[in-house]
Image: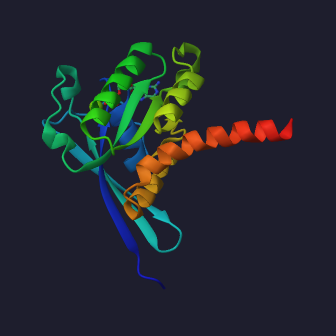
Amino acid sequence: MNPIKTYQFKVVLIGESDVGKTCLVLRLTKGIFQSLHVTTIGSSFYTKTFSFEEDEEVKMEIWDTAGQERYNSLTRMYFRGAVGAICVYDITNKNTFVEAKKRVEDLKNESPDSIVLLIGNKIDLESQREVKDEEAAQYAEENGFLFYETSAVDGAYVEESFKALASLFRHYYNNPNFIQEYTTHIKFNEDEKNQQKKKCC
Ligand SMILES: Nc1nc2c(ncn2[C@@H]2O[C@H](COP(=O)(O)OP(=O)(O)O)[C@@H](O)[C@H]2O)c(=O)[nH]1
Ligand SMILES: [Mg+2]
């Protein structure tokens, strides 16, 4: 059997309070929906390991805020060494999407190479939806972010979204220019689609 190659990286959770960041990370790492959780002082992190093929694994260290987002005081310590961010908003609250975009743009200004996963959470509350999935998907595509909609309550797409981020990290690790190429690639795909359209009709 081949030795296992392990990649390890740190990501931070960002987004307004109450969008479900802690519930998502608890769902991912413990497989449960736990609505009430004790807010610890400082930040806490969780780890989750994903396997790829037979001989590779990605160990993700996920840092969760401890309510400091209310005071907009996430420290440099929180972001130090992070390769990427998971930016969460609540699909039933438009304002959290507006704020998510601001936070992610601040992050990109500060560290342009960050990998970003945008998550619209609470899709179990479809009837109260305020943010259209197409709108968020388009925003993510234009900026080269991964995008998923999830529910921490029933677990929908939670594992998939974090695994997609882990997979992206593997590529990034093996090719530091990856993010730039990845973003260009999305745009390139758009051109390609247009070319295809021209060719076919
Ligand atoms: N319906 C629904 N409620 C959720 C979901 N995720 C979290 N919540 C609720 O949203 C509130 C805030 O969740 P929490 O994880 O503490 O948010 P945080 O402040 O971003 O960490 C809690 O009352 C949770 O029960 C979800 O996917 N669906
Ligand atoms: Mg929290």
In which quarter of the view is residue 137 placed? Answer: top right
Q: State the residue at coordinates (17%, 21%).
A: 71
Q: Is residue 156 shown above or below 180?
A: above
Residue 90: horizontal and vertical position, in percent?
A: 43, 23
Front residue (pair 83, 96): 83
- Of residues 199 and 61, the one drawn nearer to the viewer in this rendering: 199
Is 31 placed left or right of 148 in the picture?
A: left
Q: Residue at x 52, y 36 (%)?
A: 148
Left or right: residue 124 compared with residue 50:
right
Quarter of image, res 41: top left
Percent across and percent down for residue 140 are: 49, 32
For this orientation, the residue located farthest to the right is 201
User: Residue shown at 53%/41% (left/top)?
Assistant: 157
Residue extending furthest toward the bottom: 1
- Report x, y in % for residue 185: 55, 46
- Ligand 1 lies in which image quarter? top left
Where is residue 12? Give x, y as percent: 29, 42
Q: Is residue 121 visible?
A: yes
Instruction: Give the residue at x 41% y 25%.
Output: 89
Q: How many marks?
A: 0
> In the image, is residue 85 above or below residue 58?
above
Q: Is residue 3 above or below residue 122?
A: below
State the scheme by which the image is colored.
Answer: rainbow
Q: Quadrant of residue 25?
A: top left
In the image, taking residue 199 as reference, residue 125 lies left or right, namely: left
Q: Is residue 2 left or right of residue 22?
A: right
Quadrant assignment for the C terminus: top right
Q: Is residue 153 visible?
A: no
